[in-house]
Amino acid sequence: MPTKINLESILVSIDNFFNRYPFFVATVVFIWLVVVPLTEEYFQKYKFISAINAFKKLQEDPNSQLLDIRDSKSVAYMGSPNLKILNKSVVQVEFREGDEDGFLKRVLETFREPTNTTVCIIDNFDGNSMKVAELLVKNGFKEAYAIRGGIRGKKGWQEIQETLLPPFVHIYPKKKTKMPKQLDTNGGIKRQDGNNDDLSSNAGSSSNNTPKEIKNDNFSSISPTVQSKGGQRPLSPYPNVC
């Protein structure tokens, strides 16, 4: 019959081994917990990247492109970075949960050679960026990087641009356009600052002046008639002498 395994003796042997070769054990643990994950991350084709490193990659790698996956409202509020000085244009394709196939189709229509293209993906933050990066790599793209923090997040594009990025790629919220002035029924200008009372009062005062002028005209027209009823005043001081 096979002999029973003595667990106690095995544990004692392992403990003795650790005591004899502590540096070897520490090295193995370090490689397993630190070196292997870092190596996998380094060779992984989709991963996070800082905003400054993403800009450097766009600047140095001619095959790299910036993909903006925000919705139309976000893009209207704050535009994408301007990369014209790098002879590149930002590709804007909105990403929606559940529409991965449609999104991928639109992206592939834009990038003609995905196998030679490295994509840096930017969002408002970085919630969907890594999902998109993984999706693109699995569908033929050379590499895909999710920009950490996105545009508005912590250590994102907007936060570091004043200190780390050149001015030509800075992005700011777009200014709201002023409302056009409208004409009221009297032909006056309606203002948004609440000064309509002054305009209406002026219009009212001008209208009140008109009847007064009409009354004066009537009075002047009536006065000759009254004089005619009383007769013409005699030129001679004597009543019987004409």
Image (cartoon, rainbow, N blue to C red):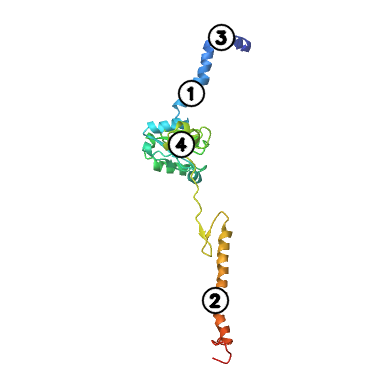
Q: Residue furthest front?
A: 238
Between discs 1 and 3, the one toward the N terminus: 3
Between discs 4 and 3, the one toward the N terminus: 3
Between discs 1 and 4, the one toward the N terminus: 1
Q: Residue at x 46, y 36 (%)?
A: 121
Residue 47: x %, y % from top left: 47, 31
Which mark identifies residue 176?
none
| Disc 1: which residue | 38
State which mark lies toward you, 1 or 3. Answer: 1
| Disc 2: which residue | 217
Q: Residue furthest right?
A: 8
Mark 2 is on which residue type? Asp
Q: Quadrant of residue 208?
A: bottom right
Residue 3: x %, y % from top left: 61, 11
State which mark lies toward you, 4 or 3. Answer: 4
Between discs 2 and 1, the one toward the N terminus: 1
State which mark lies toward you, 2 or 3. Answer: 2
| Disc 3: which residue | 17
Which quadrant would the N terminus be assigned to in this image?
Answer: top right
Q: Residue at x 58, y 62 (%)?
A: 201
What distance separates the C-alpha of mark 1 from that of mark 3? 28 Å
Q: Callout 3: helix, strand or loop?
A: helix
Q: Are marks 1 and 4 in contact (CB under 8 Å)?
A: no
| Disc 4: which residue | 121
Could you say which is closer to the camera, residue 215 or residue 126?
215
Q: Residue at x 40, y 36 (%)?
A: 65
What distance separates the C-alpha of mark 4 from that of mark 3? 49 Å
What distance separates the C-alpha of mark 1 from that of mark 4? 22 Å
Residue 94: x %, y % from top left: 47, 43
Can residue 210 be seen here?
Answer: yes
